[in-house]
Image: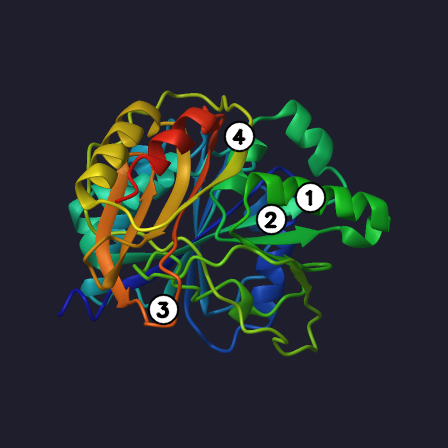
């Protein structure tokens, strides 16, 4: 069987404890049109209560992982499970069209994402579609004060689903949106009440395909179950093909404050920007959750695309600049605190 043709789409569903992941999955299952879905559920304790709350149909399979967080003690278990699932799928023992991994609310997504690009078999047979993060609008502000992993979950997101907005006032909602945008200016934000959101809004996003789209989030979208998509959304952060050294991850949930940084310049010198990126990744790669650049290179007609997660990064050329376009280079980084003034000077020094 052609491995490329058989690549399995995988969605990583994350969000802090109580953000509504099980409610979202139940809504998906209730409105699933005979697509065969396999769900991996991870619970930090020895008993997975969430799986008992799911409304299971004949088109749904559940795999439980308990006793530890996927991002730490059972990360090897996830790799082994994905290897086994691929073997059973190829042998015809299991039939499913997509995989959803629901992490515990304490999980940092970083090591899970790395699994899909470091392990050769997984990289060749599975395509990571997107990181979807649920945010509890009622409790996220105190969570961000107390639990640093909540920053990381928002920072890694390709799309954010805001829940429990019916329990807060407009002022609180605006504060929540401002905080989310400070952490992650790239992810489109949707509002879903009681998990009611069409699967087209969070599945088949293709966020890890290499493209030259670098659209910053311009707001959020309220989606009701009877609504069709009112906006054509552009996805963000679509890495990547080239692999550098993997992240050396410590077995904990510690995290510093995370925010978005935007670097802007004109045409760049290829050798200079290459040196800048190499030094940036070497010094700060472990702190940089997601990053993407669409760069104008002197004497090069095509855009240079840079995309990465921590120290796993890819480079490629995208579409050509049109004669009527301003050749502007933009580089967005979602990271723990960086010395932005110093790095911005170094970035501007790469101008041709």
Which numbered marker is on residue 80? Answer: none
- Crowding around mark 2 (Cα neighbors within 10 Å: few <14, some 14 to 19, many 20+) is many
Mark closer to the observer (2, 4): 2
- Which residue is denoted by mark 3 in the rendering? 97
Using the rendered image of the protein, determine whether residue 53 is visible from the camera's viewpoint: no
- Which residue is denoted by mark 4 in the rendering? 45
**What's the residue at 48%, 66% (across, down)?**
234
- Label 1 with label 4: CB-CB less than 8 Å: no
- Which residue is denoted by mark 2 in the rendering? 134
**What's the residue at 72%, 30% (across, down)?**
142
Left or right, 160 with respect to 248, comes to right
Q: What element does badge 4 sit on?
A: loop
Which numbered marker is on residue 178? Answer: 1
Q: Nearer the viewer, residue 20 or 156?
A: 156
- Label 3 with label 2: CB-CB less than 8 Å: no
- Crowding around mark 1 (Cα neighbors within 10 Å: few <14, some 14 to 19, many 20+) is some
């Amino acid at each position: 069987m052609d491995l490329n043709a058989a690549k399995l789409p995988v969605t990583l569903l994350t969000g802090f404890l109580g953000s509504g992941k099980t409610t979202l999955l139940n809504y998906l299952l209730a409105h699933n049109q005979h697509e065969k879905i396999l769900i991996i559920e991870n619970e930090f304790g020895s008993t997975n209560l969430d799986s008992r709350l799911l409304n299971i149909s004949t088109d749904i399979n559940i795999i439980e992982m308990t006793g530890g967080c996927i991002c730490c003690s059972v990360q090897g278990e996830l790799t082994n499970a994905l290897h086994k699932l691929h073997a059973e799928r190829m042998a015809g023992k299991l039939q499913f069209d997509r995989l959803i991994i629901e992490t515990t609310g304490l999980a940092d997504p970083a090591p899970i994402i790395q699994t899909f690009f470091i392990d050769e078999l997984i990289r060749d047979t599975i395509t990571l579609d997107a990181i979807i993060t649920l945010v509890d609008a009622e409790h996220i502000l105190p969570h961000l004060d107390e639990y640093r992993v909540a920053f990381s979950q928002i920072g890694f997101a390709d799309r954010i689903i805001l829940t429990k907005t019916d329990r807060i006032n407009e002022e609180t909602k605006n504060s929540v949106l401002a905080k989310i945008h400070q952490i992650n200016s790239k992810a489109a934000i949707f509002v879903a009440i009681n998990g009611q959101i069409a699967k087209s809004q969070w599945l088949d996003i293709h966020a890890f395909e290499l493209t030259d789209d670098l659209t910053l989030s311009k707001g959020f979208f309220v989606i009701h179950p009877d609504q069709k998509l009112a906006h054509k959304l552009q996805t963000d952060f679509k890495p990547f093909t080239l692999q550098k050294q993997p992240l050396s991850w410590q077995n904990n949930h510690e995290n510093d404050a995370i925010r978005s940084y935007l670097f802007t310049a004109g045409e760049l010198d290829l050798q200079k920007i290459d040196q800048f990126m190499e030094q940036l990744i070497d010094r700060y790669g472990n702190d940089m959750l997601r990053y993407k650049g669409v760069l104008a290179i002197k004497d090069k007609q095509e855009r240079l695309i840079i995309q990465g997660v921590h120290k796993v990064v890819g480079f490629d050329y995208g579409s050509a600049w049109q004669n009527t376009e301003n050749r502007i280079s933009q580089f967005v980084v979602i990271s723990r605190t960086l010395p932005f003034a110093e790095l911005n000077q170094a970035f501007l020094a790469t101008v041709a």
